[in-house]
Image (cartoon, helix red, strand yellow):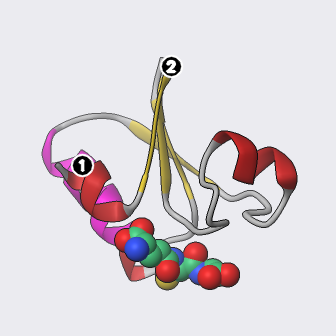
């Protein structure tokens, strides 16, 4: 399954997370969603911020955590 990053490259935090995945030669999809929706906040990021990261059942938020 391809890694999914939720957010927009207009955000420097999303760009940093995306670039980190890219330089590690991992394919990823960039997906935009309503980051304030209950579905997003319950599953991906309780703060309603981007980016969030999904690799199968691993879900991360906070760009610095994603980049590590
Ligand atoms: N500490 C967070 C900051 C994320 C953040 O502030 N993202 C902004 C975009 S640059 C955001 O989601 N803003 C929407 C909002 O706060 O409503 C991280 O590093 O991921």
Which residue lies under the disc numbered 2? 57
The answer to whether residue 7 is above or below residue 31 is below
Percent position (x, y) of residue 54?
49, 35
Q: Nearer the viewer, residue 43 or 24?
A: 43
Up-down relation of residue 24 to residue 56 (above or below): below
Q: Which residue is mark 1?
A: 22
Which residue is found at the position 26% from the left and 34% from the top? 26
Q: Is residue 19 left or right of residue 48?
A: left
Q: In the picture, residue 64 is in which quadrant?
A: bottom left
Q: Give the overall secondary structure of the magenta segment.
A: helix
Q: Is residue 36 left or right of residue 49?
A: right
**Where residue 50 is drawn, which disc sits there?**
none
The structure residue drawn at horizontal position 55% and vertical position 66%, both measured from the top left corner, is: 50
Q: Which residues are magenta?
A: 15-24
Q: Residue at x 56, y 69 (%)?
A: 8
Numbered label tally: 2
Residue 1 versus residue 68: which sits nearer the camera?
A: 68
């Amino acid at each position: 399954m391809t890694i999914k990053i939720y957010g927009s490259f207009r955000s420097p935090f999303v760009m940093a997370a995306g670039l980190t995945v890219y330089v590690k030669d991992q394919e990823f999809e960039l997906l935009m969603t309503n980051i304030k929706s209950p579905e997003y906040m319950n599953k991906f990021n309780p703060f309603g911020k981007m980016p969030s990261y999904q690799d199968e059942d691993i879900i991360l938020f906070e760009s610095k955590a994603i980049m590590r």
